[in-house]
Amino acid sequence: MADRRQSPAVFRTAFVGAGLACSILALGTAYAQTPPPATEAPAEAAPATASPATQPDTAAITDAAPAAQPDAAATAAAAADRAVVRAHGSTLSGEEAAATAAADLAAGKDDEPRVLELPAPDARRVYVFDPAHFAAMTQHFVVDGEKGRVIGMMDGGFLPNPVAADDGSLIAQASTVFSRIARGERTDYVEVFDPVTLQPTADIELPDDPRFLVGTYPWMTALTPDNKSLLFYQFSPAPAVGVVDLEGKAFGRMLEVPDCYHIFPTAADSFFMHCRDGSLAKVKFGAEGDPEISHTEVFHPEDEFLINHPAYSQKAGRLVWPTYTGKIHQVDLSSGEAQFMNPIEALTEEERAQGWRPGGWQQVAYHRPSDRIYLLVDQRDQWRHKTSSRYVVVVDAKSGERVAKLEMGHPIDSIALSQDADPLLYGLSTGDRTLYIYDQNGKELRKVDQLGRGPQVLTVADMG
C-alpha cells in the first residue's frame, strides 16, 4: 500500500526545481506589480496592496537562504526581517512576503522554500470542509472570518469528519484513504493538526476499517471535553463508537452501543446518542469492560423527523434539534443527565401553511453567549429539506420568541456562528462555492469565494 504519510496535508506539497521558481515568481510578481501605499517604508519591507479576499496568506513560499555565502548572523537577520510574524506584530503580510520573495528570486538570491505559519486561532476562525461531491481526496479551508480570507488548507481522504477543540488547541479528522486513490486497500485513520503550522501532530491508524462512510455529518465524530479522546461512529455490521487516545496517539477500543446515532460528549468518559425510538442513550465507558448504557424518556415520536445536523454546545451542554417542520427540541446536558426543555416553534402557523420549512445541510446554529438559535428556512415542497435556503429565523432559546428573520441574499446550505459577544454569522453556499460572512443582524460584510468544488460543512471553535 502506498504510504500516505509521505504526502503530509497542508501546504506541504513538495515543489521541485523550475516549477518552484516559476510558481513563486508568478505569484510574487503579481503582487509586486501593484503600486505600494504612499507611506514610506524601508525598501526591504515595502508593503504591497492587499490581495483579493480569497488569496491564502500561507500559500506563498516567501523566504530562502541566499545563494551566496554571507555570515550566519546576517542570514538570520535578513530572514527574520522578512518573516511573517504570527498574531499581533506582523512585519510583512503574506502578499508583501510574496513580493519580496519574487524580487529576491529575480535577483538570484532565493532558491529554498519557506512555509509560513498561521496566526493563533481565535473565535472568528472558521474551517470550511469541501467533500468535493464524494471525491476520494478532499480539502479543508482555514478562513479568517474577521478579514474574510483563506489563511491555510489541509487535505483529507474520503468523507472525513472534521472536529476542532473549543479552546482552539487542535484540529482533527477521522478519514479514509485507498491505496489506488479511489480503489484498492482501504485504511481508516485519525489525524491531528497543529492550528498554527497545520502540521500533523498525530497520525493514528484504525484497525479493521471501522468508520461509517456517510455524507459528512457533524457530531458523527466528536472530541471529549478534555480533548484527550476522539470518538467516532461505526455502523458495520452493527452500531458502535470507537475511542481514540489522542494523548497516547493510539486507537483505544470499540464500544458496542444500541441502534443510536450521533455522539454528544458530556465528560471524558460519557456521551449521549439519539436512538430510533425517540429517546437519548447515555453511554458511560471505562478503559475496559462493557459500557454502561441507560435511556431517557422518549422526547419525540418516531414519525416526527429530526434533521440530520443538530447543533450542540459542549460549553453550555445544550443540544438543539429541529424537526422537518421547524419545531425545535432542546436538551440541557450540562449536568451529565438529560433535562428536556419545552419545544419551541421557529415558524408561525401562517408560515407553515405557506410552505415555509427548514432546509440546507447544516440548518441550525446555536449562539451560546446570547442563548439564541439560528435556523435556515425557505418556502419549499415537503421532503426538500436538503436544498438551500435564503432566510434565517433567529429565536430566543429560552422564551421561544422570534428575534428576527434575516434575508441572506444568496442560496445558503450551511450556517455557523462565531461564539464571541458580537458574533459573525457564516453562510456557506455549496452552489456558489462561497462563504458569505454577515453580522448577527444579517448585514453582509464580506465573502470568500472559490472554495473547492462543493463545500458543505462549517466548523468553529467555541473560543468566545
Image (cartoon, rainbow, N blue to C red):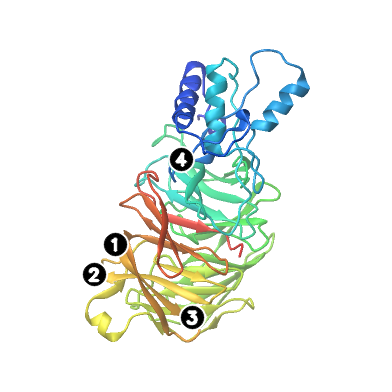
User: In the rendering, at what x and y percent does residue 223 appear?
Assistant: 60, 59
Which of 178/84 is in front?
84
**Which residue position is annotated with label 3?**
397
Label located before the other in sequence (2 or 3): 2
Measure the C-alpha gap from mark 1 to mark 4: 33 Å
Query: How far apart are the two marked residues, 3 and 1, measured between alpha carbons?
Result: 25 Å
Give the mark toward the camera: 1 or 4: 4
Q: Which residue is mark 1?
A: 387
Q: Amino acid at mark 2?
A: Arg
Task: Check contact, mark 2 vs mark 4: CB within 8 A.
Answer: no
SS class, disc 2: loop
Q: Nearer the viewer, mark 4 or mark 3?
A: 4
Residue 155 vertical position relative to residue 69 in the rendered view, above or below: below
Amino acid carrying mark 1 in the image: Thr
Q: Amino acid at mark 4?
A: Ser
Q: Residues within 10 Å of mark 1 (few under 14, many from 20)?
A: some
Where disc 1 sits, the SS reads: loop
Disc 1/disc 2 C-alpha distance (Å) = 9 Å
